[in-house]
Amino acid sequence: MRLLGSGLVELIAGILALNKGTVFPTLNYESADPECPLHVVHDDSTSAGTTFLNLNVTPQGQASCVMIRRVTT
């Protein structure tokens, strides 16, 4: 099964996070792996900032990248 629309879903989630002002939490994350130091969002208190990068690559080698920035007036 190919997930052709997953990049668009990720883009929509990023735009919604910018509008909300916080990053969506990671669901079902229970414990950190000490061998893999990642910052995982546990709650709605992490600020989304003003910019995000959406990068997608297909198994066929096609790639797309878009940078979105929230402009305040």
Image (spheres, rainbow, N blue to C red):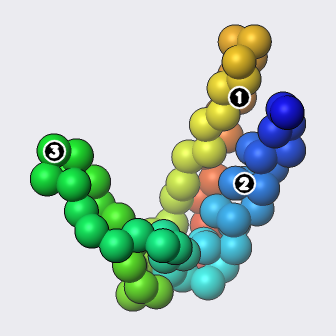
Type of amino acid at the residue the image marks with label 3: Glu
Q: Quadrant of residue 7?
A: top right
**Callout 1 amino acid:** Ser
* Pointer 3 local density, CA inside 10 Å: few below 14, some 14–19, many at least 20: few
| Pointer 1 residue | 64
Residue 25 coordinates in the image, percent (x, y): 49, 76
In the rendered view, tell whether residue 31 sits above or below residue 2.
below
Q: Quadrant of the C terminus?
A: bottom right
Per the model, the C-alpha gap separating discs 3 and 2 is: 29 Å
In the picture, the disc for residue 28 is none
Does 40 appear above or below 17?
A: above
Counting residues from the start of the chain, the first of labels 1 and 3 encountered is 3
Question: What separation in Å lies between label 1 and label 3 (alpha carbons)?
Answer: 30 Å
Question: At x 81% / y 39%, what residue is drawn?
Answer: 3
SS at mark 2 in the image: helix
Q: Amino acid at mark 2?
A: Leu
Which residue sits at x=84%, y=32%?
2
Q: Is residue 23 visible in this depiction of the protein?
A: no
The alpha-carbon separation of the residues under discs 2 and 1 comes to 11 Å
Numbered label attached to residue 35? 3
Residue 54 picture location, percent across and down: 62, 44
Q: In the rendered view, does 34 fall on the left or right side of 1?
A: left
The residue identified by callout 2 is 11
Residue, x 16% and y 44% (percent of image)?
A: 35
Question: Which residue shows up at 46% across the image and 86% down it?
Answer: 44
Q: Secondary structure at mark 3?
A: loop
Mark toward the start of the polypeptide (2 vs 1): 2
The quadrant the N terminus occupies is: top right
Q: Residue furthest left?
A: 34
Question: Does residue 23 appear left or right of residue 5 in this picture?
Answer: left
Quadrant in which residue 46 is drawn: bottom left
